[in-house]
């Protein structure tokens, strides 16, 4: 694959700069979105609310694929990482509201924690632009 076939976009997250990664990368027909939380800049949206954090995180991830001209209908995979299993229902509700019509494959994991302990949810997307 030539370098012209790969395009990267940044969202302005401070971790993108300090860790050296892109928010989203398009390579061929695939667009991959990195782990995304409900941080926008230095502000955490939905602190203490897993539903709100999931909605904000997924919205930010969808904004990243919009940079490539794609929308929710292009999403083929989601991954959801939770800090607590108690939040499954609330995060699932947010996922259903956004993706019910699309029905991407989904993986849901409970993890030990995140860089910032206030983060309850991190999401990833994969979209197809074929």
Image: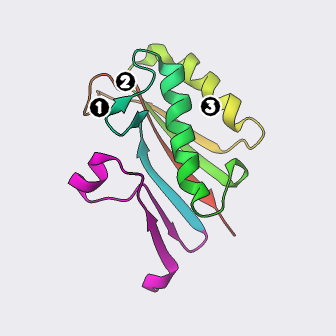
Q: Residue at x 28, y 47 (%)?
A: 14
Q: Which mark is residue 94?
A: none
Circles 2 and 3: CB distance less than 8 Å? no
Q: Secondary structure at mark 3?
A: helix
Q: Secondary structure at mark 1?
A: loop
The residue lying toward the viewer, choosing from 10 and 54, is 10
Q: Is residue 96 above or below residue 16?
A: above
Residue 16 drawn in magenta:
yes
In the rendered image, residue 100, in percent from the top left (x then y), is placed at 74, 35
Figure colour scheme: rainbow
Q: Residue at x 69, y 70 (%)?
A: 130
Circles 1 and 2: CB distance less than 8 Å? yes
Q: Which mark is residue 114?
A: 1
Residue that numbered label 2 is attached to: 83
Q: Is residue 76 above or below residue 115?
A: below
The residue lying toward the viewer, choosing from 66 and 98, is 66
In the rendered image, residue 91, in percent from the top left (x then y), is placed at 55, 24
Residue that numbered label 3 is attached to: 95
Quick check: can you spot residue 118?
A: yes
Residue 34 drawn in magenta:
no
Counting residues from the start of the chain, the first of labels 1 and 2 encountered is 2
Q: Residue at x 54, y 21 (%)?
A: 51
Q: Residue at x 56, y 44 (%)?
A: 78
Residue occupying the far left of the picture:
18
Residue range of the region highlighted in magenta in the rendering: 1-29
Distance of label 2 from label 3 (alpha carbons): 16 Å
């Amino acid at each position: 694959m030539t370098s012209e076939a790969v395009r990267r976009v940044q969202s302005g997250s401070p971790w993108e700069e300090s860790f050296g990664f892109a928010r989203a990368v398009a390579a061929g027909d695939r667009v991959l979105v990195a782990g995304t939380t409900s941080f926008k800049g230095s502000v955490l949206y939905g602190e203490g609310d897993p539903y709100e954090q999931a909605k904000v995180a997924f919205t930010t991830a969808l904004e990243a694929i919009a940079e490539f001209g794609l929308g929710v209908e292009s999403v083929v995979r989601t991954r959801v990482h939770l800090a607590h299993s108690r939040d499954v229902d609330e995060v699932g509700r947010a996922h259903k509201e956004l993706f019910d019509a699309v029905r991407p494959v989904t993986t849901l994991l409970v993890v030990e924690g995140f860089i910032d302990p206030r983060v309850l949810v991190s999401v990833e997307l994969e979209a197809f632009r074929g």
